[in-house]
Amino acid sequence: MRLTQKFVTLFILTILSLFLVGCSPTTLQTTETNAQTNSASDDPIRVVTTVGMVTDIAQRVGGEHVTVTGLMGAGIDPHLYRPTASDISTLQNAQIILRGGLNLEGQMGEIFDRLGDDIPVITMADDLPEDQLLPYPQYPEHHDPHIWFDVSFWSTAVGTIADALSELDPEHDEDYAANAAALQTQLTALDSYVTEAIATIPEGQRIMITAHDAFKYFGRRYGVDVRGLQGISTEAEAGVQDVQSLVTFIVENQIPAIFVETSVPQRTIEAVQQAAQAQGWDVQIGGSLYSDAMGDFGTNEGTYIGMVLHNVAAITTSLGGTLPPLPDELAGYEDVVQVATETA
């Protein structure tokens, strides 16, 4: 009996997934509400997302009309992530797939291309003006994928997801629009808060050194000189010369604090700290930042807003600034700011 083209495609994807299986366990996150699915027409839409920043917005915008499964949880590096056989099955059963794009999920590009023939694959970066995207020095044909660190940029993703869900499920388009508008209001307040907080750091101390170069959009938007030990992708290893150059910069400029990241091993930044101390400058670890992954699912740090607030609290207090009070629109996130400040 002749195999259909669709069956052949799924067979190829399954074989490919077995080849790509990583050493780590499956990291799926599924919203607890609407976790059951069946074939009824009024069942929630099966949404599959990649990184947590996309997962959170999809949950907020989709509300009760979606079941969102995120492939990459806390501490997972999307640059290095290899999909498991379970991931492939989850993607095949999705009604819509949402991803960051710009080569963020570098190991999954071919899989998205194949699935896109049958399932809508929506890319957050597609609605951003190309002339506002930052370059990716190692690959001139690509752009920096870390667009969520400019809150005004990431607000665009809210509309992208609302439009995609409305097209798939026009019956509930008003709900998607209302959810998106409520989230946009919070993100507008968040963007203003970040601007105000960073402005309290003395101008000469607005220098932020991290494990890898994920914060360029943050630096451009909020006026911070950002330097990463590794490149934009964590696939690029930092060499001895990279460490030495960064240490020299830290000592000469008397940088008070440098930062580790939750999705990147700490050892390289700790090596920088030790080398600076050996040269007589006691630079501190200013806390752990969320970069390519958010906090644990179900916590405030496991939301986009909480992730940003945690980072801003750690950066501001470590570099000599003072945090302003949270605006009313961000009520409920006070614990994030307090914890980040205490550990900075």
Image: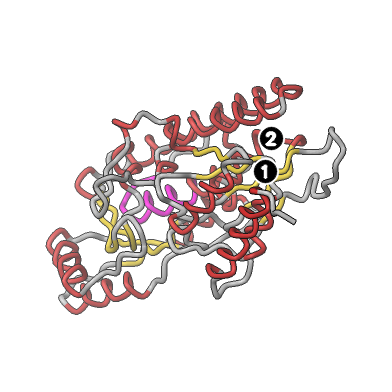
Q: Amino acid at mark 2?
A: Gly
Residue 209 horizontal side relative to residue 63, left or right: left
Residue found at the far bottom of this picture: 278
Which residue lies under the disc numbered 2?
62
Residue 115 image position (x, y, % from top left) = 59, 47
- Label 1 or label 2, whichever lies nearer to me, is 1
Residue 26 image position (x, y, % from top left) = 63, 66
Residue found at the far front of this picture: 1
Mark 1 in CB contact with mark 2 (< 8 angstroms): yes
Quadrant of the drawing holding the N terminus: bottom right
183, above or below 266, in the image: above
Residue found at the far top of this picture: 174
Residue 113 image position (x, y, % from top left) = 51, 46
Classify mark 1: residues with Cα within 10 Å, few (<14), some (14-19) or many (20+). many
Task: Kindly report the distance in space between the C-alpha atoms of the residues bearing marks 1 and 2.
Answer: 9 Å
Which span of residues is magenta-colored?
309-322
Asked whether residue 51 appears in the rendered view, the answer is no
Q: Quadrant of residue 282?
A: bottom left
Point out the tag, 1 or 2, that comes first from the N-terminus.
1
Q: Quadrant of residue 324?
A: top left
> Which one is in front, 291 or 39?
39
Quadrant of the drawing holding the C terminus: bottom left
The question of residue 204 being in magenta is answered with no
Q: Amino acid at mark 1?
A: Val
Please report the residue visible at 60 percent of the width from the left and 47 percent of the height from the top: 49
Please report the residue visible at 69 percent of the width from the left and 54 percent of the height from the top: 3
Q: The residue tagged with tag 1: helix, strand or loop?
A: strand
Q: The residue tagged with tag 2: helix, strand or loop?
A: helix
The question of residue 315 being in magenta is answered with yes
> Which one is in front, 152 or 230?
230
Which residue lies under the disc numbered 1?
47
> Which one is in front, 120 or 290?
120
